[in-house]
Every structure is written in structure tokens, then in C-alpha cells.
Image (cartoon, rainbow, N blue to C red):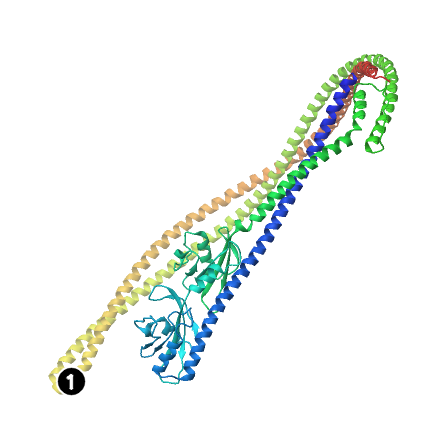
Amino acid sequence: MSKREKHRAIKKKTGKIRNKLLIFIMPTVFVLVAILVIITSTLSGRSLKKKSTEQLEASMSTQVDNISSWMNQCLKYFATVKKELEASRPSQAEMQTVLDSFYGFDKNAPEGLYVITAEGRLLKPSESALELSDPISSEAYKQGITRIDMDFGPAYKNAEGKYVITAAGILNDNTSDIKVLAGDVTLDNVTIIVNSGVKMEDASSFLVDKENGTILAHRDDNLVSTTLDTSNSDAMMAGIAKKIDNRDYATTTIAGKMVGVKEIEGTDWILVSYIDENVIFADVRSLVTLLVLIGVIALIIILMITTLVVNRVIAPLTPITGYIKDMASGDFTIDVKTTSNDEIGIMGGQVSEFVGSMRNMIQSIADESDRLKEESIRSDEVSRDMSEASTAQADAMRQLNETVDQLAVAVNDIAENATILANVVSDTKDNSEKAEQSMNETVRISRQGREDMEQLKKAMRDIYDSNEKLVQSIGKVGEASDQITNIVGLIGNISEETNLLSLNASIEAARAGEVGKGFAVVATEIGKLAQTSSESSQNIANLIEDVRNLIENVVEQSDVSAKNIERNTELIGAAVDTFDRIFQNIQLSSNMISDMIKGIEQVNDVATNVAAISEEQAASADEILSTSQNMVEQAESISRSSQEVADSSHELAETSDKLTSYVQQFKV
């Protein structure tokens, strides 16, 4: 590579480092400047908004104070007139003179002061144009009758359609007549204070009656006497109406305007002042524009300074970059020189040490590569001999493995068959033992059944004897019922005879007349008793007849039961004989099963011994087979390892050649 090409490569590399540094530095500086501009504008906006709020509230306080001062001045004048009238106690004519004398003194009350009596009379200055169709129902009288001292009431429209406020109070002239002194004051002066009394530039104010929302004074005459409502199409006016409804008098922002609300003490009026926030923040926007301009200029200056500093800082890297390019091309004959004592100078010194280390290492690698090639040739020869020997050993072990495998299969078959036989004999033994237990249980149950049948036969004989006694008892009951029938018949005959005697006695008593009436009553009662006895005897006879029929049925059923009991007794006897034969056969079977279990136990012992021996032989065969397989695997592994060693030797030789060619590329 020529010096010109090296210079171009170094220059290109230097440019990239510079660009990276500028890419990292400049966005950071830009973000910091932007953050400073944002923080400055935000803090300035907050400070300006706070000062504007304080200025707006101060302006409102001044306006409220001016309105209150004006109202107090009017009240003071009215109170002076009231005191003079009360002190002089004038007559009606004198009162007229006083009212005329004070007419025109207060421009705020163009119609002067007037008096309304309880009879509805109106006393006013002679030059006044005031007209009240019904003085008693006027606002002046309604307000004044409730107050002793002069004070203003709510605003209202007079006969001319203008909003006025009335200062009224009871006039105490020590007469029995009730009088009210009043004076109507126009809101012209209030309007002047509201519209021109704003001390904050570009701010506006208007006056609202909070009870009914009526606008009393406004810069726009079209809005005067309109009602402030939350449904107003103007978002600011609707927001102000909502604040007043909620009695929220704090300064806030509504529809992009800063709005302040303040009550006027002693009235139902509320002064509202507002100013557009765009006006407030106009200075802030100008400040932000100036800050952005200053920031852009600062960025340009910082970019120039940073570029100059970066170029000076990275200048010592240019020769080091050339040294690194030479090392990358394999030239380690270079001599690295450093001219600075900073980090770049330290890096140049380390590069110089690295070049020296690489020279020694490359020379050592070249020497080791030659020795490695010789060793790989010898390893290749040894691995070939080892591979041939391991292959022959693997073939021999494979044949031995096949023989042992066949032997293991045969031994395993014998072991499996012996195990199956032992399991079958064991299962047969278990089943025989269960059969013996079942047979013993059957013998016990059959013996118990035979005893139960004997008891049943005896019970049937007892039932037969009891049935015979029952038949005899029933026969005696039949004989007794016959005797009762005869007695009942005799009672019936006696009842008939008694009835006839009663009838004859009644006839004889009737013949005897009054003397025989008592006897007739007795004869009648005897006749009734005889009739009752006859009916009872007949009922008894019927019952006895039913009993006799039932006894005959019972006798018949007893005969049938006796015959059935006799037949069952014979059957039970036959069953007892059958149980005897079954018991003898079961006893014989039980003895035979016991003998069979003893033979099965002997077979089980033999099968268990055979199975154990077969399992031991199978285990030994498996161990031999496993050992043989391990030997085969080891032989095959040795063969593979030998082949791998041979392959590795070839690869090692090739690697040595490559390593030699690589080392030859370096200049040391």
C-alpha cells in the first residue's frame, strides 16, 4: 500500500470518529438547550400568570372599594337629610320646603328625596318628575318599611326602564303616621366605575346581581339588563354563571380567559373582571422566541468549537491508525513512535509493545509448527497399527458375544418357564387353601342346618299339638254357645209372656178407671221393659248365630292347618335325612381337599427351587453377556479411537502446514 492510500484511509477513519463524536455531543447539547428554554418559559409563564392574577385581583379590589365608597357617600348624604327632618319635626308644608331645598344637591339622585306615608301620599320636590301610581306598592316603600336607617336595596327597573337602586328607611318624626324617606339613585356612576376603573391594561369588567343573574353594568350596552345563565352560547359567560351559582369566587381560567369574581359588601352585586390569556402570555412568547434564537446561535457556536476541539484531540490518532493498518496487513517490522503523554500516547506505547510481542510469538509459532508436523507423522503410523489390532480383537469378541447371547436366551427361557410354573403352583395352593376354608365353612353350616331342621321338626310337632288343643277349645266354645242360645230363647219366651201380662194389666187398669191409672203406668213400663228384653234377646241370638258360624269356619281351618302341619312335618323329616347325607359327602370332600393341598405344597417347593436355580443361571448368563458386550464395545471404541487418532494425525499435519503458511505471511 502506498503512502497516499494510507493517508486516504487514515483521513477516512478520522472523519468517521469525528462524526461519531459530533453525533453524540450535538443532540445532547440540543436537548439541554431545549430543556433550558422549556424550563425558562414555563417558570416565566407561571410567574407572569401569578403576577397577572394578583394585578387583576388588586384592580377588582380598587373597583369594589370605589363602588362601596360611592354608595357610602350617597347614604351619608341621605342620612344627613333624614336626621334634619327627624330633628325639626316639620309639618307637611315644612317637609315640602325641606325636600325642595335639598333638590339637586346630589347628582346621583336626579329626582331628589321623597316621602311616602302609610296612607299612600307621596311628598316629593316640586321640580321632581317622579311619578308613582301606587306609592304603597312601590319598591321604595317595600324596602324602607323594613329599615330604620337609610340603606340600599336590590337594583330594579323604574318606570322609565332604567336600572336604579333605592336608599330608603323609616322617617321617625314623632308622629303617629308611618313615613318612609327614599331616594332613587341611577347606576350611571357605577357603570363609569366598572368600565373605566380597571387598572389592568386590556382587562374588562361588568357588574352582576347574584340573586337573579342580571347584568347591571357592562362595556357592551347590549348586554346590560340581560341575564347571565349557564346555557349562554358564550363559553366564558356560561362558565362565569356556573361559578356564581356555585358561590365559587376564586380567580380561574375560563374559555382561555383569566376570570376574577369579587362580591361587593353590603349589596347583592358581584364584580367580574377578565382578561385574555393571550395578552398575558404575549411577553412570554416573545421571551421564548428570543430564547430559541439565542439557543440556535449557541448551538452553531458550540458546533464550531466542538468540531475544532475534536479535530485537535483526534489528530494524534492518525499515525497510530497507520500502524494498525500495517499490522492488519501482516507487517510487524514497523517502529511505533509516540509524541504525547496522554491516553493516546499511552495507547501508542501499548501498540509498540504489542508489535514486539507479536514478533516473538510468530517466531515461536513457526518453530513449534515444524515440530508439530514431525510428531503428527509418527502419530499417524502408530494409530494405523493400533487400528488393525483393535479391528481383529473386535471380530473375535463379536463371535464370543453371539455364542454367549444364545446361551443367555436359553437360560432365560428356562428361568421364565420355571417361574411361571412356580407362580401357577403358588396360585393353585392359594386356591386350594381357600377351597379348604370354604369347605370347612360348608361343613359347619351343613351341621348347623341339620340341627336347625331338627328344631324345626320339633317346632312343627308342637304346633300340631297346639292346633289339636285349639280345636278342642273351639268345640267347647260351640257347646257353650248352644247353651247360651237356649237361655236366650227362654228369656225371649219370658219377655213375650211379660208383654202379654202387661197388656192385660193395662186393660184391667183402664176398666178400673181413676183408681187404676197408677197401675196402668206401671203396666205400661213393664210392657216397654218386656219389649226391650225381647229385642235384646233377639240381638243376642243373632250374635250367637254369627259366633257359631265363625266357630265352624275356625274348626274347618284348624282341620286344614292340622293336615298341612302333618305334611310339613313329614317333609322336614325327609329334609333332615337329606342334610345327613349332604353332611357326610361334604366331610369326605373336605378330607380329599386336605390331602390335595399337601401334594400341592410339595410341588410348590420343587417349582420354587427350580425357579430360583434358573434365575441364578439366567443372571450369570446376563452378566457374561453384559461383560462380553462391554468388551465388544471397548474393542470397537478402541478401533474408532485409533481411526480418529489417524484422522487427527492427518488433520494435525494439514493444520501444521496451514499454520506454517500463515506464519510465513508475517514479516518479522
Quarter of the rendering containing residue 297: top right
Q: Is residue 298 left or right of residue 280?
A: right
- In this view, the residue in front, 561 or 193, is 193
Residue 291 visible in the shown view = yes
Q: Secondary structure at mark 1?
A: helix
Classify mark 1: residues with Cα within 10 Å, few (<14), some (14-19) or many (20+).
some
Classify 14 as above or below 515: above
- In this view, the residue in front, 648 or 555, is 648
Residue 632 visible in the shown view = no
- In this view, the residue in front, 219 or 271, is 219
For the C terminus, the quadrant is: top right
- Work out which residue is located at the far bottom of the displayed protein and give it: 515
Please state the horizontal and vertical placement of residue 579, each as a whole percent of the image: 52, 43
Please state the horizontal and vertical placement of residue 231, each as a whole percent of the image: 41, 54
Q: Amino acid at mark 1?
A: Lys
Classify 570 as above or below 506: above
Classify 663 as above or below 266: above
Seen at 31% across and 62% down, the residue is: 547
Quarter of the rendering containing residue 467: bottom left
Quarter of the rendering containing residue 338: top right
Please state the horizontal and vertical placement of residue 635, each as a whole percent of the image: 79, 18
Seen at 69% across and 37% down, the residue is: 301
For the N terminus, the quadrant is: top right
- The residue to which callout 1 is attached is 517
Seen at 72% across and 30% down, the residue is: 18
Q: Is residue 411 left or right of residue 642?
A: left
- In this view, the residue in front, 665 or 33, is 33
Q: How many marks?
A: 1
Q: Is residue 651 left or right of residue 59?
A: right
